[in-house]
Amino acid sequence: MPTLRDLGEFEAIRRLVRARGPEDPDVLLGPGDDAALLRPHPGEALAVTVDAFVEGRHWLPAWLSPRGVGARLAAANLSDLAAMAARPRWALLSFGLRADHDADALLELQGGVVEALAPFRAAIVGGNLAGVEGAEWVSLTLVGGVAEARAWTRSGARPGDLLAVTGRPGRAGAGLALARALGPARRAEIASELLDAWLQPVPRVAFALALAPAGAVTAAVDVSDGVAADLERLCEASGTGATLEAEAWPADDALEGAAQDLGVPVDALRFAPSDDYELLLAVDPAGRAACERAARETGAPLAFVGRFTDAPGVIVERGPDGRERALAGAGWDHFAR
Amino acid sequence: MPTLRDLGEFEAIRRLVRARGPEDPDVLLGPGDDAALLRPHPGEALAVTVDAFVEGRHWLPAWLSPRGVGARLAAANLSDLAAMAARPRWALLSFGLRADHDADALLELQGGVVEALAPFRAAIVGGNLAGVEGAEWVSLTLVGGVAEARAWTRSGARPGDLLAVTGRPGRAGAGLALARALGPARRAEIASELLDAWLQPVPRVAFALALAPAGAVTAAVDVSDGVAADLERLCEASGTGATLEAEAWPADDALEGAAQDLGVPVDALRFAPSDDYELLLAVDPAGRAACERAARETGAPLAFVGRFTDAPGVIVERGPDGRERALAGAGWDHFAR
């Protein structure tokens, strides 16, 4: 198990480059020159996003293997492309690593990214390796392609559009809260649905790509800060409000169990800060069937949980008793903790 | 002078986004959605590169202002695009910052990037802000555009091609060596040409863009690790060797002074590890005049200092006495120090 110091920077880069995933005829020049040279599809716009993980903040070695770190970082970025209905094409990885970093662990970390990109035949085309003394970090830039007219944005929701959500938002935050409360030694006590949602989120790329051609989606955002915070952003960008129906959410035993364990209402978990990497969609009512079809075809759980309204910024949940109340939950702040 | 903790992540991002540079009609969607949406020029390939700076390694606050850090990071990336003859178009900035980071200093850092990109009307279209406890870091991804047939690579040099070099390589490394030897208190004793080469390198983008249409350049690499190391890479990629002429280098009083101060031969500085962000070019002999014209028009010093040969990997310098000897110098290794 050689360290980066043992191998030296250039041998480490050589090993990384050798393991960087599928051949792509549109990669005219991959790693090894001053820049990668890439051929976009004619007429396609680029969707580009960058996300970074910092050791001790975004990953804890006790909870996540190197491969898991790479997979989760890729998922965070892939989810951004899913929210634009863009097809992932190319990635660049920028590392800050200690000299005693195990070289095989680094290949594992990159392997997690490669594996997450593989279903889309997206490749790592470049990167950078910098030395650090303290906490390590990884920054991933992802480039996707999308026909300009088909790209989803946050700003197109209209009053009357349906609010749809994939998966079971809130689980990731609940998993994290329980992990903090119990620690890694008591990992087995945490429902696997919650741990998986936190540690191994599944970005909804396949679902988005299957649905985009239908033209049913008027706006989209991914849930990286929690349903309340991200829905607020979508409503702000679109100039709408939203009314959620408490009864419309599918039962979620895992989340209800966590609410009991943590002594909070289930809604507080469902709407609270949680990086689920699920999608919130505004859907033209005529497009509901298309959404359900795409969800079925790609195995993505989908629920219609409310409607957009003409009251800008007013986001409420209507309970079983017909009364409306404001949504619990607010977004993460990386500097406030 | 509020800190990031005072402002909170989202207000900090708002301030960053407000100051991100020129409007670009090909930015269909800038910061604020899940990903930026960009329109490439029809028929143009993308040149993409990423580079990162780590506090204490790539910048020392005593030597470089926040604006200087941003400018230098941008220069490192711009130089990679120059070496591909690509026009800089879009950038993404990923930060790892402490909560007590001064928000104005952060805007200054970004301002350094914005200013460096401005001559090319290139804009920052996205980014990420992560919190760290220890050393801070910045990672910049740059996307450029280049007609596929005009892109320079490292692999096209042919025996008989001329070797041209911009600027005065070695100065940056000499400036750094003197800075290490003397410390910031004795800054005034270091020749400004050396300090500027280290702290404020000028990437040769304008020169490369002016020259590319002439088709005179058969291969190119930027000097980020030193002439010896980067020339070796170009020769390796092209399957050639190179013979340099000691007498062909223009006089460089600043470098000679540094050689004296440091007690080393001037060649040891000229060829040694040095991140000058100058260009090494392989030039078709028929294209020499075109190179000189582009250099004149864009104010880039240019010298023809040798020729490529058919002896793969053999890189020698011929002295005034006609004798050939191997080049001094070898590249950086970020993990070996």
Image: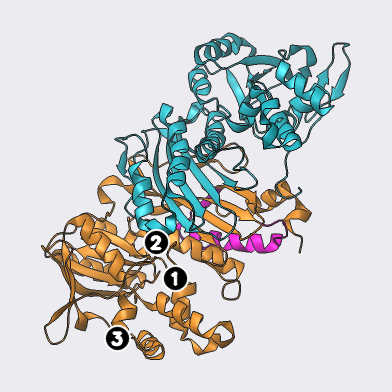
Chain colours: A orange, B cyan
Amino acid type of disc 2? Ser
Mark 2 lies on a secondary structure that is helix
**Residue assigned mark 3:** A251
Q: Do the residues labelled 2 and 1 touch (CB within 8 Å)?
A: yes
- The quarter holding residue A263 reads bottom left
Main secondary-structure element of the magenta-colored stretch: helix
**Residue assigned mark 1:** A201
- The quarter holding residue A188 reads bottom right
Q: Does the magenta portion include A110?
A: yes
Q: How far apart are marks 2 and 1 (CA)?
A: 9 Å
Residue at 49% in and 27% down: B149
Residue at 25% in and 80% down: A249
Amino acid type of disc 1? Pro
Q: Mark 1 lies on which chain?
A: A
- Classed neighbour count for the residue bearing mark 2: other residues with Cα under 10 Å, few (<14), some (14–19), many (≥20): many
Q: Distance between the residues labelled 3 and 1?
A: 19 Å
For the question of whether residue A50 can be seen, the reply is no
**Residue B52 drawn at (x, y percent):** 57, 46
**Residue assigned mark 2:** A79
The residue lying toward the viewer, choosing from A268 and A157, is: A268
Q: Do labels 2 and 1 share a chain?
A: yes
Please indicate whether residue A244 sits to the left or right of residue A259 in the image.
Answer: left
